Amino acid sequence: MKTDQGNTQNRLNGVKKVKTYFIVTYGCQMNEHDSEVMSALLEGLGFSPAEELEKADLIIINTCAVRKKPEDKVASLLGKLAPLKNINKDLIIAVTGCMSQQREMAVHLKERFPFVDLITGTHALPRLPSHITRIMEIKQRKTIVDIEEDYAKREGLPVKHSSFFKAWLPVNYGCNNFCSYCIVPYVRGKERSRKMDHIIEEAKILAEKGYMEITLLGQNVNSYGHDLPGKPTFAALLKEMDQINGLARIRFMTSHPKDLSSKLIETVARGEKICEHFHLPVQSGSDRILKLMKRQYSREKYSSLVREIRKAIPNVSVTTDLIVGFPVEMEDDFHETLSLLEEIRFDNAFSFLYSPRKNTKAALLKEEISHQDKEKRLGKLNNLQHRISKEVNETLVGKTVEVLIEGTSKNNPDMKTGRTRTNKLVHFPASGELTGLLVRVVIKEARTWDLIGEVE
Ligand code: SF4
């Protein structure tokens, strides 16, 4: 697929000397991947990465709209960026991503931060080069806003992977589920699956370049293919991926429980490279709340899925997402969530306070819980899960696990850090440049968030 990159590069030559860029990314892995695409597009225009935000000629804030907190962070960052415009008159500031894809928010950002040069949404990614070129050419700048929906143009965009040994690989974009609390279908659009041969081709190129691990990405990978001719399944895609020479690990996220098939579980169980880890967001343990959330499964259906996964795949890890304080969550509902944690014993759970998102169905529900009570519930839930995570991790002490080394530990220069196939963080003493290598590590100590070991 052609982008307007070539033309804009020609127009840019002779306009400016080498410029630098800095991207601040909030939110999920899909946003991180979008930032990798933006980096490649900008480098195609002749930009190079800046070491620090303050020194960049172009600052892009890639935003997240899933909760209020990341939106507040964007506003606070933009406030801090304003003075930089006085130091560097040519500085370009752009806001992109899910937050600015919402029309009302784009208008609000334009009014509140008039010094922002470009406001785009998730659909405008292929048009980034032409917008930046135009801004650089114009003397009297006005904010450009581009939040037009455009579903067709993503295939073939370049990517600058931020790691040399692991890569994100999108399999589908958007979401059709409209869970009542979620803004994603409104900002990422309807679900579009990439053709299987495009995904496989990209994965093969990554493997040839020496990438060890690929994470297949989608808002709901389990519904991959339903919109393609012949309706290929995600299980079929994983099976093909498993055949690619050179890869050591294949991961995938996120899985919607309602679309998780027995075939997929069987494929993971049989796969050689497919990692034994399911991130399966449950959100609540109460059937009443699950219904109001429009999650389309019951607590029992979810539990039986986890039982099926654990039966088919010994040593699998299962992690989840939870929302605390959904508008009409009563104390009884919350206790159902706590009892689900006790029942399932997740390896880890990522829990968030509910935050109303404009235009979603749940935002119309009357808030019946005070913020203080929500915080209390979150604290209780986290304490319980932390205990469970530690207990689950303790079962690994004395066992040997395969670890893909990700680098030197942030807290100790004499330790390396890596991940198991089950996505657990492991630290162990080692020296030298070992990033991207697989080692076998004996686990000596278990903690809530990570494990300590020694190379076998
Ligand atoms: S499946 Fe539900 S929670 Fe996930 S992105 Fe789609 S609407 Fe949002």
Image: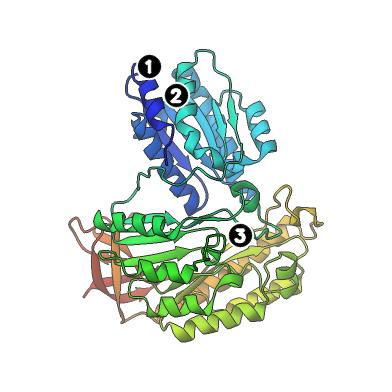
Residue type indicated by callout 2: Thr
Q: Residue at x 28, y 58 (%)?
A: 207
Q: Residue furthest right?
A: 366
Foreground residue among 297 and 91: 297
Q: Residue at x 51, y 41 (%)?
A: 62
Q: Nearer the viewer, mark 3 or mark 1?
A: 1
Q: CA distance from mark 1 to mark 2?
A: 9 Å
Residue identifier under label 1: 15
Assess whether mark 2 and mark 1 are in contact (beta carbons under 8 angstroms). Answer: yes
> For residue 416, what is the image quadrant?
bottom left
Residue identifier under label 3: 352
| Residue 410, image x, y percentages | 33, 54
Element marked by disc 1: loop
Residue identifier under label 2: 133
Task: Tell me if 74 is positioned left or right of 2 in this view.
Answer: right
| Residue 336, image x, y percentages | 69, 76
Q: Residue at x 43, y 82 (%)?
A: 313
